[in-house]
Image (spheres, coloured by chain):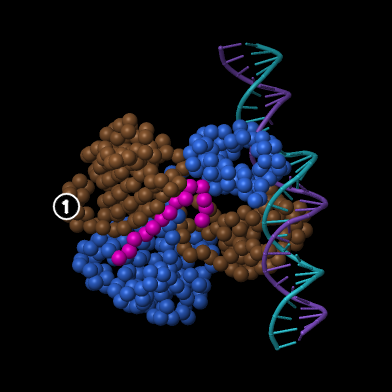
Chain colours: A blue, B brown, C cyan, D purple
Amino acid sequence: MNPARRIRDEIAAAIRSGEWRPGDRVPTEQDLAARYGCARATVSKALAELAAAGLVERRRKAGTFVAHPPVHSAVMTVPDLAELIAARGEAYRWEARAIERVPAKKASALHIEGVHFAAGEPLAIETRIIELAEVPAAADADFAAVAPGTWLLAHIPWTSARHVIRAVAAARAEAAALAVAGGTACLELKRDTWRGARPVTHVRQLFRGDRFDLVAEFQAGSRP
Amino acid sequence: MNPARRIRDEIAAAIRSGEWRPGDRVPTEQDLAARYGCARATVSKALAELAAAGLVERRRKAGTFVAHPPVHSAVMTVPDLAELIAARGEAYRWEARAIERVPAKKASALHIEGVHFAAGEPLAIETRIIELAEVPAAADADFAAVAPGTWLLAHIPWTSARHVIRAVAAARAEAAALAVAGGTACLELKRDTWRGARPVTHVRQLFRGDRFDLVAEFQAGSRP
DNA sequence: TGCGTCATTATGTCTAGACATAATATGAGG
DNA sequence: CCTCATATTATGTCTAGACATAATGACGCA
């Protein structure tokens, strides 16, 4: 086994098991180097990885300490719906309801509305705006056939996004599109996507509450 | 500026801006070392960080390549409610409704129910089970005065968790506790917490849909 | 043409040593 | 007893070189 990996894993295990408690002092790099019979740089690398993972905190002169557990945070995966539903083993279908260009003075945007179906039943309604200035190729895409999310995933590299998740009651028209009663509890997911400082797309997805839930995992000191 | 940091930031900028596209080849370590006038180990460290962040992919012999953007994932912060509400500038209060021990053959658990108030109005109801086998100190804690989440955050180091988020309609009793009409859309958050393979606590929080939303951010190639 | 072998090559890891940096601990002076 | 300057110390970063590892591509053989 790699010395660096061994040091990292052994310390991580001690922290995760609770043997070393938050605030405890971790031996100095020199100590560990001597104990494991390797160079200080190797120990340093191992500790740097642990620090990057958030398991330890390092302060010059003071030393390395077991970190205090972070505020609960978790990694939520917001998958492409086509993929998600296929993974569930259900048939997926996208049905566009409206596609129109919204021209303005200098920029124009694409406005898309439609419904995602899983196993023949509506799962979510989607309202999306795509900035053609940032994604000119979207003007030629056929969003009647391919869901915009799926298309964008394949065509837009490396963006940042902000999600807001709420529970809302379905309005009358939304409920009709989702084939549920008016006022039914739905999960609303809004996502703004940017490249640098410029908006790329904005989407609002309204999920039938009885057919969808989000899962988020948090593994102590591991980065997905 | 650090050479390593400079290399890392310049390459990250090129990728994020779209100048280098997914699949593009990144210059070899030797090239970069020559270009930046530093040792190969320094370049290697910079590239290793970019790989850890997911911005590039490295393959022996083949080289380093700009990674393909991942499935949309985002880091969701599920903060302690007391902190969250204080940060909003509202008054926070926890009101326990029931605290009882549930003894079994070999282990016993603490069952807690209560309501979180923000600005005097109910925000969420909480139902929690704490495994006393894993958290013996919880037997002596005063959960009438301190919300269990707040207490646990301070007493339990380094756990893993799994969250499931859904939109549900409030049942009659839940709606009464939240001071909303029956059937109102609420955000349900269930969290199972573990240390290693052993369960520590399970909690279900039901948020008033009109007073709470979850925010999750995704920054291209930056780790939470 | 097809296939297996081998040299090449880029990354992966490590070493021993050096200097930088920042924060703590110490000691001198008030 | 307090304050400020200084020495110490642990981490942070870097270098130059070495060997390991794995995958590719070219070569030779059938």
Image coords of residue A208 (percent x, y)? 29, 65
Q: Residue at x 20, y 66 (%)?
A: A182
Would you say residue A220 sits in the magenta stretch? Answer: yes
Q: Is residue A202 visible?
A: yes
Chain bearing tag 1 is: B
Secondary element type, mark 1: helix
> Left or right of A70: which side holds C23?
right
- Dividing the picture into quadrants, the one containing residue A58 is top right
Q: Is residue B92 visible?
A: no
Nearest to the observer: residue B147 or residue C21: B147
Q: Total of numbered circles in the picture?
A: 1
In this picture, is A73 found above or below B92?
A: below
Image coords of residue A97 (percent x, y)? 33, 77
Residue stretch in magenta? A211-224
Nearest to the observer: residue A203 or residue B191: B191
- The residue under label 1 is B172
Would you say residue A74 sits in the magenta stretch? Answer: no
> Left or right of A108: which side holds B69?
right
